[in-house]
Amino acid sequence: MISDGKNRYKSWSDLRKRMDGLLCEALKGRITCFFTRYHGVHNVYGRAAVRCDGEEWVSFSWTEGSEQRRDRTALYEEMGAKPRNWAESLRFYRLVSERGEREKWMPGCVLCENDFLDSVTAYLQTEVAAALASDNYILRLFAFLDRRVGKRTLLKIRGEAEALPEWVKKFYRLRCEAEGLSAVSAEPAPGGEREGGLAAEEVPGKKGNGKMKERRPEGAR
């Protein structure tokens, strides 16, 4: 992943607090972000992770960064890249990095702690709607957990979310489950109303009473 030089940070604890403030109510206390650097080792290795209920659901470390460097070397050789100056070197670096992200790193989560940190700082500067459509799957992951993303939006993006790699998709499913949306179908329930292509939802916590949740006006969350 390429940093544009704007994504600087002073304190991980400050970034974590800001990210925690964007977490939806249904997952507060369950989702945590972790980041550290091992300053006592060569090249300052690091590690990051997103945890759910204390268990790491996805991690990012220097080992993936090493794999990225090997991939870049192979792509340079495949492209026959022979930059003649610094500007050409930067152009080739961007080209091979973009190709690596598109073909392997994002789909397979071959992402290092710096990719995670760059994504956190970028997310805090990105509109949530843009994050939901981003080619950066870490941004999508964050958006799936964001309190600004409502239930209607979660249902609207279901098809697109389900087409994502498993390491991203499972966070979408977690959010839907936490919001009580896992049983909602695109088809109407027997005897239920169909509105906007969705079956009406039963009021949570009132099973068997036959009451249905009131639908909000179009455009509301």
Image: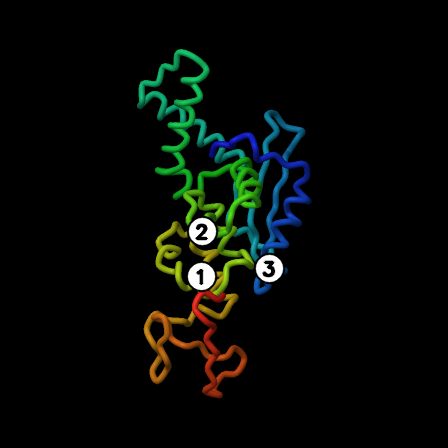
Where residue 187 appears, x then y in whole percent? Answer: 32, 73
Q: In terms of depth relative to the viewer, which is nearer, 18 or 80?
A: 18
Q: Residue at x 44, y 39 (%)?
A: 110
The span from disc 1 to disc 3 (Cα, nearest Å) is 22 Å
The image shows residue 99, relative to residue 153, as above or below, that is: above
Quarter of image, res 14: top right
Where residue 131 appears, x then y in whole percent? Answer: 47, 48
Mark 3 is on which residue type?
Arg
The dot on residue 30 is 3
The span from disc 1 to disc 2 (Cα, nearest Å) is 10 Å
Q: Which residue is mark 1?
A: 153
The dot on residue 132 is 2
Circle 3 crowding by C-alpha within 10 Å: few under 14, some 14–19, many from 20: few
Looking at the image, tell me whether mark 1 or mark 3 is earlier in sequence order. Answer: 3
Q: Are marks 1 and 3 in contact (CB under 8 Å)?
A: no
Q: Is residue 34 left or right of residue 183?
A: right
Q: Are marks 1 and 2 in contact (CB under 8 Å)?
A: yes
Where residue 55 appears, x then y in whole percent? Answer: 56, 54
Q: Residue at x 63, y 60 (%)?
A: 29
Circle 1 crowding by C-alpha within 10 Å: few under 14, some 14–19, many from 20: some
The image shows residue 193, relative to residue 97, as above or below, that is: below
Q: Secondary structure at mark 2?
A: helix
Q: Is residue 29 left or right of residue 63?
A: right
Mark 1 is on which residue type?
Thr
